[in-house]
Amino acid sequence: MGIIPFSISKITGGVLRSFMNTMIIKLLIGVVCLVIGVLLGIFLRKNTAEKVIGSAEQEATRIINDAIKSGETKKREAILEAKDEILKARTEADRELKERRGEVQKTEHRLHQKEEALEKKTDAMERKSEELNRKIAQAQKTQEEAEAVKAEQIATLEHLSGLTREEARDYLVKSIEHEAQHDAALRLREINQRIKDDAEATARELITTAIQRYAADQVSESTVSVVPLPNDEMKGRIIGREGRNIRALENLTGVDLIIDDTPEAITLSSFDPVRREIARLSLEKLILDGRIHPPRIAEMVQKAQREVEQIIKSEGERAIFEAGIHGIHPELVRLLGRLHYRTSYGQNVLLHSIEVAHIAGMLASELGLDPTIARRAGLLHDIGKAVDHEIEGSHVTIGVDLAKRYKESQAVSHAIAAHHGDIEPTTIEACLVQAADAISAARPGARRENLENYIKRLEKLEEIANTTPGVERSYAIQAGRELCIIVKPEDVSDDQMTMLAREIAKHIEDELDYPGQIKINMTRETRAIDYAK
């Protein structure tokens, strides 16, 4: 029993050693085969890579050769194109150079002609200069002779009068002082007369205002409008059956229609210019339409009212735009527009207000004040005339109430109140508005004046000047405010001009009645005329 196990273990050990040896041998064989395979793979890969590299080098060489050939071709093409461009540029440059040369030649020709003309002018100027120098020398000689004669005459006058030059000058000064005192007295008389004239003008203004406020059957240019008719048959259509058409028109507009024997015309009478304008537009529309009956009359009156309201609004806006002011209440703008239909002494009140605004603003600017307040007060100073026939009181009082109602400043309200002297002005702006109002009213042509008398006054001014010895001709300008006189230089000297102007002024003062003052502008001119032959 003990011997058998020992034998089995011995056999097993031998088998294991034999198995291990076999495995080692196989392992060594595998390692050898692996090394051989690796070496073989490396060799094959190297051969393959060398073949690929060789092919790539051949392709690259081919591509480079192709690129070189293509570059040479493009190079030759570019050279040819450049040569063509150079040729074209050279041709164009030659053409422009030729044109420039032509222009330069023309310019040189013109310059040459101008040089010749300048040389001729220079020669002529030199000749004229020599002639002028000769005449100047002759004039100086004549002047010296005149001075000698003058000195001799002065000595003779001193001998004959028994007065020296100083004594004669003192006597002349005293005479002028006496004459100035006389002129001052005349001015004082003129001022007093002007005050009386202003009082009379104010009375006429009050009468005109009263006529406009009171609806009386009085015909004047301020209260009537004339509507032309296509024929006299239209009068019967306007009157209508039993007078229903004319009654409807009068009731709707508040205007009296006067249909008399005047051919092809109807007169509209009303103290309210706005209502008169509405009636005029309505009647003109009805005449053009041809359908005249009460319903149609009512429709046309409504259309005319809308048109007049639009006109009033646009005229008010135009007025504030022209005056250069802003921030006025819309109701005041509408009232300003109503002044477009109001006249005073034949002067449109709206235009007068705009003019006063501009004048007051310019005066304020000249005095270094704010022109805005002055323009605002000037534009609104007659605003009461837009409603003075509807509300009791003068247009000044109504204007002040309107200014306060629509939040105008105290300065504007005070200027409105003082522009006719109802109260004493306490601000400079009020004084400026007062002065601007007077200037606008006194401007030539602003107020109605007899044209024939105006022309006669101008002719009389020129006649007084022309009949004075030594006067060659005269012109009345600036609406008779200035008399331009040209004297004869051979008859009137420079020293005599002052005395001659004073003589003409005294003659005008003695023979004419006129407002303000007339400027005497006297001119003496000496000309030397000669002819080059």
Image (tube, rainbow, N blue to C red):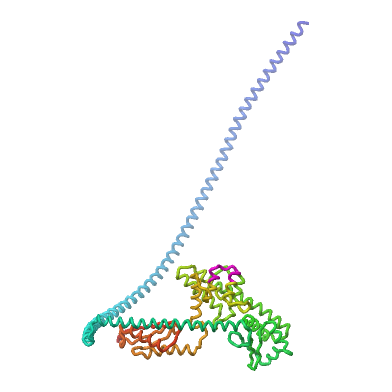
Residue 439: where, in percent of width, then height?
A: 48, 78
Front-most of residues 370 and 93: 370
The residue range painted magenta reads 402-414
Front-most of residues 496 and 192: 192
Image side of residue 267 versus residue 371, left or right: right
Q: Residue 412: within the magenta?
A: yes
Q: What is the residue that sits farthest to the top in this orientation?
A: 2
Image quarter hosting the N terminus: top right
Q: What is the residue that sits farthest to the right in this orientation?
A: 1
Front-most of residues 311 and 85: 311
Q: Residue at x 60, y 82 (%)?
A: 212
Determine if residue 291 is in view.
Answer: no
Residue 341: where, in percent of width, then height?
A: 59, 80
Image side of residue 50 versus residue 189, left or right: right
Q: Residue at x 50, y 50 (%)?
A: 68
Which of the 4 image quadrants contains residue 245? bottom right
Q: Overall secondary structure of the magenta stretch?
A: helix
Which of the 4 image quadrants contains residue 167? bottom left
Residue 307: where, in percent of width, then height?
A: 64, 78
Image quarter hosting the C terminus: bottom left
